Structures are given as C-alpha cells and as structure tokens.
Image: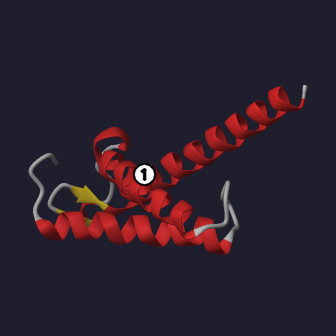
Amino acid sequence: MIGMDFLSFLILLIISVVVSAILHYGLKYYVRPTFDSFITKVIFGWLGAWLGSPVLGHWFSGLAYENVYIIPAILGCLAVLVLMGDLALTFCKTVKDKVDV
C-alpha cells in the first residue's frame, strides 16, 4: 500500500470525506464546530482508511480495488476518527479541570 496509484488514493479520500462528514455534520461529533476541525478529520480519516485493510484484514474481495478493501477501510477510518475525538475531548476536559483549580 506504500506505492499506491492515484485511484486508490482517491478511493481512500472519498471514504474519509464521507465518514468525516457524517461524524462532523450529521452526528455533531467534534471538539470544535469549525471547518478546520472537519479538514483535520479528513486527514486523520484518510490515515485510518489507509491502515484499515492491513490491520483489519482483507474482507469481501468483490468490494476491493487492488489493495484497498472498502469495508475494512471504512471501519479503520471510523475507528481512528472516534479514537481521535475521544482523546481530544478527554484532553480538553483534563486541561480545563486543571486550569479551573
């Protein structure tokens, strides 16, 4: 997956944009409601989608393009975005609690 072609990159980018948009605008799952936060989700979501197939495995070869397996890519993207959001919210709350003391 290191030397991927442009179509593989584009598939991962589309997966990341769709999952990020659902989380950010649909479910209102964000730390800040800004466009910058959405772009950050897209970047980290792409990394999660890229790692999805190698980490989660190769499922449903009919839903794949070269080494990009769609379902593991979606799950990897979702996992990284939820983990990133939880860590950010936890860190922001911890910092706020320490500042208030």
Which residue is pictured at 56% across the width and 44% down the height?
84
Quadrant the C terminus occupies = top right
Nearer-the-camera pick, 67 or 77: 77
Question: Residue 6, how many percent across, how many down?
Answer: 13, 67
Disc 1 marks which amino acid?
Phe
Residue underneath mark 1: 44
Q: Is residue 70 visible?
A: yes
Which picture quadrant has residue 97?
top right
Is 82 located above or below residue 65 in the figure? above
Q: Is residue 63 visible?
A: no
Query: How many neighbours does mark 1 have within 10 angstroms: few (below 14), some (14-19), or many (20 or more)?
Result: some
Question: Residue 10, how many percent across, how many down?
Answer: 24, 70
Which residue is pictured at 74% across the width and 32% down the height?
95
The kind of secondary structure element at disc 1 is helix
Q: Is residue 38 left or right of residue 9?
A: right
Question: Residue 2, how many percent across, how many down?
Answer: 14, 46
Question: Residue 52, how many percent across, how many down?
Answer: 36, 48
Q: Is residue 1 left or right of residue 38?
A: left
Which residue is pictured at 63% across the width and 73% down the height?
25
Is 40 located above or below residue 88 in the figure? below
Q: What's the colour scheme? A: secondary structure
Q: Residue furthest right?
A: 101
Q: Is residue 65 left or right of residue 46?
A: left
Which residue is pictured at 32% across the width and 45% down the height?
51
